[in-house]
Amino acid sequence: MHGPKLHVRGTSVDGHQITCIDCIHSGEGSSSQGNAYYHYTELFPHFVVVGAEHLDPDASTVEELSFSLSDLNELFYDPDAFGLIGNASPIMDAVLEEKRKRRPIDVGDCPEVHYYTGKSTALDVDTAIGNLIVRYERSTRFGGTDGIQIKNNRRIWIKPHQPASFFDAIDRIVVLRRFFSMAAGRPQKIRSIRITTISDRTKLKPLRVNWSFAPKGPRGDHHKPDRINRPFDPIGQPDEFTTSLKNWIDRDGKMKHARVRHLSCMERRDGYGVDRLVAAANLFDLLPTDAWPPFTVLPDGLSEFQASAEKALGTIEPSQDRDSVLAAVKRMGKPSLPKKVLHRWATASKDIPDVFPELEYVLKQAVRCRNYFVHGPSSDSFKFERAEPFVFFLTDALEFVFCFSDLVEAGWDAKGWAKRPYSYGHTFSRFRWGYDQTLAAFKASMGQPT
């Protein structure tokens, strides 16, 4: 037992050291066979670490960790790293010069040269969670009668500034999963986690981590990002990407709860409904106060009323009605949900004022729809039956503004993005696709002139 969590160590039949981390005790019993009696315990581990030695999950021993994600190759797409020279006759003598020193090699009528430029690193940047490196993990088959092969996959390495504990290391992976899920436009699956510790035994052969309840990833190629629909181009515009990534990570402590909830909305994929709409609107209430519009300074009379009302309500025995009134009094001067949503869009869209016309109207209706289901019908004459066919549109608008403003705040170039071509791919592009037509249909449904 280590602290509040149960960890179990063992050795496999082939000599690997196994550490079962954060185990749940699910049962135990005893049995017999002939004259032999034995007892057993059933455990469910959340993580299983396998390698040359055991791991103490609570000790700060993790020096480096690496993993991959579902769409890392697409996000860091490099069109020039690998290639084929089809008509290679003019260069074959130079290519084969060294090999021909050992034996003669004939060249046929249609020689080809498959190449790899050797540029493996796509990212190397220092951040609040450590030094981040993205590079190829490459495997090569050198040739023969079966041909040649160069396979690669992008992989992320995190080198904490100081050795970290196992759970801290996992938290850093989860932070990056949130960022790259947003960048890809769909939830990312975490793959192939490896850990290097301060022990020399793990330097050449890192420990392998198996995660029982690892976050789920995308289903096949549905909404798979491509080079047109990515909000970032880490290869072509590395400075913009590294600046946005660093700043985004810097704010994750403040933004964590809202970003986690946003990712849970994304995980519903193409599933829309009232619950998702409410969750999308509530994202803006979870933002830190420095992301809200300024508080309103109450006039002297209203300020005095607020203070006296709080004092008077404080003398009344707590109840649901009393607490509701007290909460309303304390909110005086603080921005409402509609103001928070509109403020985020106004701030983020200042460089692209004409890309999404009348989005403010859409956002106002989205919040009214949310209020209808949170507080019930009110006297503001909102007709849900008119908005119901467009719940998907209202939800997309809220999620888009949350994600868009988060990236702009981190230093992302929204104006440059708006100038690029787009298709029905990334979340941002899907919202742009057909926006004008959907807006017109929505306004007509709501009885507004188009």
Image (cartoon, rainbow, N blue to C red):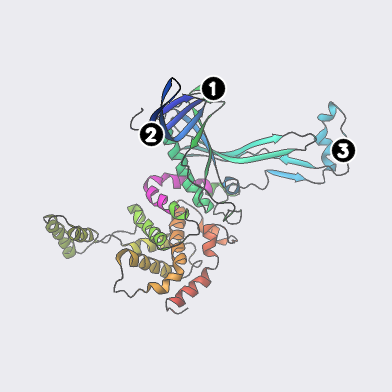
The relative height of residue 444 versus residue 9 in the rendered view (above or below) is below
Q: Disc 1 designates what residue? A: 15
Looking at the rendered structure, the kind of residue marked 2 is Gly
| Dot in front, 1 or 2 | 2
What's the residue at 48%, 70% (across, down)? 357
Whether tag 1 and tag 2 are in contact, CB under 8 A, the answer is no
The relative height of residue 196 versus residue 152 in the rendered view (above or below) is above
* In-image side of 80 versus 194 (left or right): right
Residue 179 visible at all:
yes
What's the residue at 86%, 32% (across, down)? 105
| Dot in front, 1 or 3 | 1
Q: Which mark is residue 27?
A: 2
Residue range (magenta): 241-262
Distance, label 1 to label 2, CA atoms, is: 27 Å
Magenta span contains residue 244: yes
The relative height of residue 132 versus residue 61 in the rendered view (above or below) is below
Magenta span contains residue 21: no
Magenta-colored segment: predominant secondary structure: helix
Residue 59 visible at all:
no
Residue 326 in the image: state x and y as whole percent: 19, 58
Say few, some or many: other residues with alpha carbon within 10 Å of mark 1 (under 14 / 14 to 19 / 20 or more).
Answer: few
Q: Which mark is residue 57?
A: none
| Precedes in sequence: disc 1 or disc 3 | 1
Looking at the rendered structure, the kind of residue marked 1 is Gly
Whether tag 2 and tag 3 are in contact, CB under 8 A, the answer is no
What's the residue at 34%, 56% (across, down)? 285
